[in-house]
Image (tube, rainbow, N blue to C red):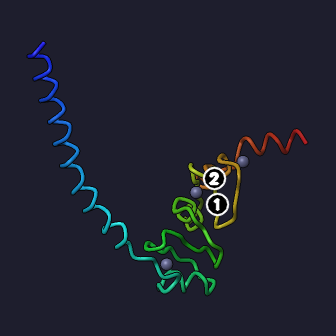
Amino acid sequence: MKRFSAALIVILALFALAACQQQPAEQAAAPAEEATVEKAAHDCEACAKGEAGETAWCEGCNMGFVKGEKVACKDCYGAATAELAGWCETCGVGFVKGEKVACKGCIEAAIAGTECAACAAKKTEA
Ligand SMILES: [Zn+2]
Ligand SMILES: [Zn+2]
Ligand SMILES: [Zn+2]
């Protein structure tokens, strides 16, 4: 029984030690959060261009503009600025020469230079 309580004391001491060691780490983490600099809105070249109606992506703000229209997703921006057509898997939208298209088949067809089989079938049905 004596041995058991001795072991218990050792365990408790270890816990207390661990608790003490954790505190300085938490204190060190706090100032780092405060140091996060608040981003000034649109003082960057890319955003200024975009707001002026141009097509630009701002790496700093992580957003872009396609012909002055705000685009929050980089894949969408890439798709919208693709030479022929592009598809954003994340948002499920695509662009053919900058025009928004909801059908992925149309995007693939536009890249391949063919017609979208799915949409062609719909047209003949209607
Ligand atoms: Zn920006
Ligand atoms: Zn997207
Ligand atoms: Zn289609």
Q: Residue 21's spot in the image, x, y percent?
A: 18, 49
Residue at 10 percent of width and 23 percent of height: 6
Which of labels 2 and 1 is toward the front? 1
Q: Mark 1 belongs to which amino acid?
A: Phe
Q: Amino acid at mark 2?
A: Ile
Question: Which residue is painted at 47% across and 84% down in the image?
Answer: 44
Tell whether label 1 touches label 2 (CB within 8 Å).
yes
Near mark 1 (Cα within 10 A), the count class, few <14, some 14-19 or many ≥20, is many
Dot 2: within a 10 Å radius of its alpha carbon, few (fewer than 14), some, or many (20 or more) residues? many
Viewer-proximal residue among 5 and 79: 5
User: Whole-percent x and y of residue 87?
Assistant: 58, 54
Ligand 2 location (quadrant): bottom right
Q: What kind of element bears circle 1? A: strand
Give x and y (percent) for residue 120. 78, 44
Task: Identify the residue under disc 1.
Answer: 95
Label 2 SS: helix
Q: Position of residue 23 (x, y in %)?
A: 24, 53
